[in-house]
Amino acid sequence: MEINSDVNILGSLPDFNLVSVFYKAFILNEEGYEQSSSYTKIKTDKSVKRFEKAIRETFLRFKNSRLRILIGESLETDGISDQTRLILFWNASFNNELFAYLNTVVFFPAFYSGRLIIKQDEVSACLKELRLTKKKLQEWSESTLELTASKYLTLLKKFTLLEGKAKKSIRYPYLSDKQFMLFVYIMAAVETKPNLLESCWLLYSFHETKVFTERILQKKFTKYISVTFSGNNLTVTPLIDYKEIYHASF
C-alpha cells in the first residue's frame, strides 16, 4: 500500500472549487494557477503548492482516458456540484490507497450496517492498527495520526457523505438514474475483473449487491449498457461514448 499525507491535506482544503481551478490550469492548459491563491483563502505559495500536488495526485489523475473524459465532462459542465463531488469521491478512492482502505474498513461497514454516526476514535484505531504493519505510518507521530483521522472525516463531509461538526453523521445518498449509470460506467472503466459482482468497487455503488443487480437489470438502462447476468456472474458493456453518457437524458 502506498501511503501519503494527501488525506490530511485535502481534508484541510478551504474551497473545493480549487479542484476546478487546477483542472483548467493543468488539464485544459488554461491560465488559472496564478489565480489560485486569491481565489481561495490560501495565503502562501507554499500552501498552494501543497494543495496543488494533492489535488493533482488524488482528483486529477485518471486510470485511463475513459475516466478522464467522464470526469472532465463533469467538471467542465457542472463545476463542483454534489454530483461532481460524488464522482471525485470515486476517483479519489481509485487513486489514494490509504483513503480507499479507510473507506473499506471504517466508512462502508458503518454505512451498510445502517449506523448513524462515525467517530474519530474509530478512524484513529484503524490507523494505529495499520501502523503495526506499514513502515511509512510508523514514521507518523500520534498527533499526525489523530489529525489524519479527523481530516478523513472532514473530507467525507466535503464529499457530502457525512454531515455535522463535533459528531459526524452518515448521509445515505440515493443515486439518481443518471448517477447510477455514471457509476456503472466508471466501474466498468476501472475494474479488471470481468465479473462485476467480484469487484471491490461494488461497495461504492451505495447499494447492497442484490439491490444493485436488480437495478442494473432494469429495462430502462438497456440503451446505455449491455448486461449479461447468470446467477453469480454479472458483466456489463457500456454502449455510449464516455463523453456522451454524462449528457445523456434519463
Image: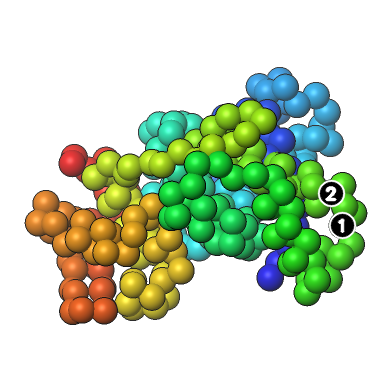
Residue 72 in sight from this viewpoint: no
Residue 154 is left or right of residue 47, and the answer is left
Amino acid bearing label 2 = Thr
Residue 67 is left or right of residue 197, and the answer is right
Residue 136 in the image: state x and y as whole percent: 82, 66
**Picture disc at residue 144:** 2
Q: Callout 2: few (<14), some (14-19), or many (20+) C-alpha neighbours within 10 Å? A: some
Q: Residue at x 51, y 58 (%)?
A: 109
Q: Are marks 1 and 2 in contact (CB under 8 Å)?
A: yes
Residue closer to the observer: 78 or 108: 108
Q: Residue at x 41, y 71 (%)?
A: 199
Picture colour scheme: rainbow
Q: Which residue is mark 1?
A: 140
Q: Is residue 3 above or below residue 247?
A: below
Alpha carbons under labels 1 and 2: distance apart:
6 Å
In terms of secondary structure, where does tag 1 sit?
loop
Quadrant of the snapshot with the C terminus: top left
Residue closer to the observer: 24 or 97: 97
Q: Quadrant of residue 128?
A: bottom right
Residue 115 in sight from this viewpoint: yes
Q: Residue at x 19, y 68 (%)?
A: 227
Residue 164 is left or right of residue 248, and the answer is right
Residue 169 is left or right of residue 54, and the answer is left
Numbered-mark total: 2
Q: Residue at x 28, y 59 (%)?
A: 212
Residue 184 in the image: state x and y as whole percent: 32, 58
Amino acid bearing label 1 = Trp
Q: Quadrant of residue 189?
A: bottom left
Residue 55 in the image: state x and y as whole percent: 64, 45
Q: Quadrant of residue 133?
A: bottom right
Q: Residue furthest left?
A: 219
Residue closer to the observer: 138 or 53: 138
